[in-house]
Amino acid sequence: MASEKILLPYNFSKSDKKALDFVVRTFSPSVKSVHVTLFHAYTPLPKIETSKSTVMERLTSGMGYARQRINELEKDLQQIRTLLIEKGFPRDHVST
C-alpha cells in the first residue's frame, strides 16, 4: 500500500485544532502508512549591527520579543508533533 503524505499548515487557531483532530480521526486506522508534516511559516529576523546607536539598540530589544515568540511557537509546534505521536503516528512519520 502506498503511503499518504499530509501537509498540515498550523497557525494555532481554532480551525487548525479542528483540522488536527480531523487528521487524527480520519487516518488513525492507517497511521503506519501516513506521513504528516506540520507547517508554520514566519519571516526570519535579520541580524542587526547596533554600533552604539540608540535607535538600533531599541530595535534590537524589540526584536528580542519577536525571537522569544518564535521560540515559543516552535516549542508549541513540537508539542503538536508529540500529540500526533501519542495518538499512534510513528515518530519518524511526523515532522515539522
Image (cartoon, rainbow, N blue to C red):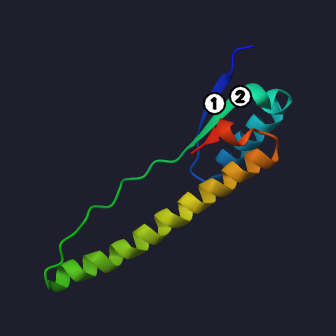
**Residue at position x 71%, y 28% in the image:** 34
93 displayed left or right of 43: right
Q: What residue would you read off at disc 1?
A: 6
Local secondary structure at mark 1: strand
Classify mark 2: helix, strand or loop.
Answer: strand
Quadrant of the rendered structure where residue 5 is?
Answer: top right
Q: Vertically, is 51 above or below 33?
A: below
- Which percent across, then down, holds residue 29? 86, 29
Q: Residue furthest top?
A: 1
Mark-to-mark CA distance, 2 and 1: 7 Å
Q: How many marks?
A: 2
Q: Is residue 72 above or below residue 43?
A: below
Q: Amino acid at mark 1?
A: Ile
The answer to which of 14 and 32 lies nearer the viewer is: 32
Crowdedness near tag 2: few (<14), some (14–19) or many (≥20) residues, C-alpha within 10 Å:
some
From the image, tell me which residue sits under label 2.
34
Locate residue 90 relative to residue 35 in the image: left or right: right
Q: Amino acid at mark 2?
A: Val
